[in-house]
Image: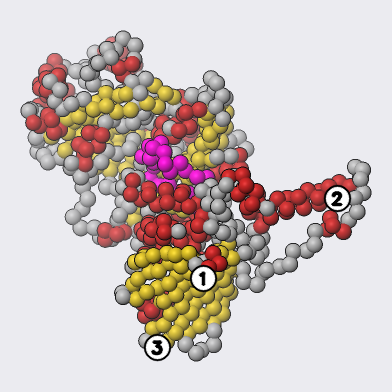
Amino acid sequence: VRDEKVKVLRSIRPLSGEEIQESTVRGQYGKGWVLGEQVPGYRDEPKVAPDSETETFAALRLSIDNWRWAGVPFYIRAGKRLPKRVTEIRVQFKRPPHLTFGREAMKEVDPNAITLRIQPEEGISLKFGAKVPSAGLRIRSVTMDFQYVTSFLVEAPEAYERLLLDCMIGDPTLFTRADEVEAAWHLVDPIEESWRGGRPPLGMYPAGTWGPDAASRLLQADAREWHRP
Amino acid sequence: MSTTSSTPADPAWHGTDVTMRDVLGALGQIREKFAREEAGDDEHAHPRNCVMTLVGVAANDEDERLAQRTSMAIGTHHPAQAIVIREEAPLRGHHLDAWIDTDVQRPATACAVECEIITLHVRGAAADHLDALVDPLLVSGVPTYLWWTGTPPFRKKELLDALRVCDGLVVDSAKFDEPYNSFLGLARLLKVAHHRLGLGDLQWARLRPWREMIAQFFTPRDRRAFLAGISEVGVDYAGEGRGNRIAAALVIGWIAGALDWKLRRAVAGPGGVVVAHYESGGRSVEVNFRSVEKTHLAPGELSAMRIAGSSRGMTFRLTVQHDPQRDRDHPEPAYRTLHPTGGEDDAGMELAARRAEWHRDVLHENLGSLHHTATGDPPGESRPRSPVVFRHERRRPDSTRVLLTLIEIGETEPLRHVQQVDSEDVAALLLDLLSTGTHDEVFNRSLGAAAELVHKF
């Protein structure tokens, strides 16, 4: 498992110069509303400099140059003070070149997708188009859902619970190896350096939203949009 | 779903002055408990079913109950999560009260499903940030519909923020406080809201029988040519003023949008008649809006429509009338024939009740002028805050469900058809809109054309 992780990291095309401007977004939250409560902006938080340029949000577009993922864009976003705490991986399938039921019937259909939910509600959901049960021919997106908690009725161990156990029994599978750390920093270092120089500029976003507008534009440039978790 | 039954031990939770974290925690526990209870001896439980999240925004007790009742009615057949939000007067240090109610249905041939209704009473500025309240509760991967039972704040940025997390907005333009301005605000959303947002209007759903009647007239192949020969349209509506012409404008917008009529001008004529002039293929089409007094209709409801014209030397006229022969004489209130009895005996109490009823009648008759005195608004510009009680009393279910259609073509005898129209149950109307995903191109086109017309009023 650890070898494969390193192989993937080494296959990611490093970003440099203009690519960093075009393919990365950095942001910082301002004051806003989260979970029905007003929260201060990052620069108003205790022990934070009022002119801090520290990022609280990042979005990236990456490419993996290997046989399996050639031509598939990977979009990553992470941030603080977003509307909810959620970690998930979404694999969105391409639309087929020919729409059997015509564009009009398929207008409300999102692309088929598999979502792997890491937390909360660990599970997998599959989204696909189904015919609306009426006289006309209209297709709408529906989901098939699998959740660990309802399917097995056992509590998943806490993340650190598992790691501590692995540590005690000497299983390093989930631990990061030195070459993995180096491969990761090899990708991140040039981005960080560019960001320190203010390229791209820091985008502000109100707390409780899904990041700065630049994050939306990053996907819009590819005629895509972020999935709402 | 066929046979269903509700468990008496449905989980429920209530918290006073809580946070959204408390609500999310309670919701998680309720879901887990449901999953465990339903698993029985088989450890492999089914996943939680949910077809949508319906967010209802209620302005008062009555709307809140309506939203809860409707959500429950829909959830019975379509497992859903409903969130009912009610803004309360600010109270220092007290922000959020929450209730979670569930209804479990056990179909005979499928696994149990749970409908969740989360009611939030929000105080202070938090109520302006619906997206912050709702977003953490949303179920991923299923559509979210926002049903605003009153008048959405179309001019506020916060509405657009709330709509960002929604796939559709459903309103009832017949219940707007300021129908004219609010309707234009609704139409404006077509341009300013995010591109995936669908719009729905319960009033549009209520107009379905009218639209069907008109469409059916032109459906036979030999009548298709009449569409290009329409020269005159008349709409009668209850109430006065431009605010009460919304339903009429929606129907005309529907016809104009479908037939590609171009609006040239609208002018006020004598007797409160407004005439709109359209142009289509070099021809002129005149549309007359006429206010009529129909006590059994709520302000703004359609009373009649007439479509006339000629094609290839053949004249035609379609007339659709609402409740055509149900004008009844109101009986003389009984109180006038009774003598005051005084005292607290039954007769005295009955007399008091009758007086109260009479007082309410008088209030109802003068509602428009009382409202005008209070606000200074011209007739139809705005509506009394709580006219619903009067409207419900004025509607008689037995007499407002009939449409009479008269068809006159050439010199032949008029064809007469009477049709009972479906109930106006809110749950049914809402479901009708939600079943299309609120992405209805015909409605959008009609709304745009109606707004153009309303703007000329």
Residues at marks 1 and 3, CA–CA distance in whole angstroms: 23 Å
The image quarter in which residue A170 lies: top left
Q: Which chain carries label 2?
A: B
Q: With B158 as the anchor, is B416 left or right in this view?
A: right
Placement of the C terminus of chain B among the 4 image quadrants: bottom left
| Residue drawn 33% across the image and 28% down it | A206
Q: Is B169 a magenta residue?
A: yes
Magenta residues span B149-173
Q: Mark 1 lies on which chain?
A: B
Q: Position of residue B290 (x, y in %)?
A: 53, 67
What's the mark number on residue B313? 3
Report the number of numbered marks.
3
| Residue drawn 53% across the image and 68% down it | B270
Q: What residue type is labelled 1?
A: Met
Q: Position of residue B194 (x, y in %)?
A: 32, 44
| Residue drawn 43% across the image and 67% down it | B276
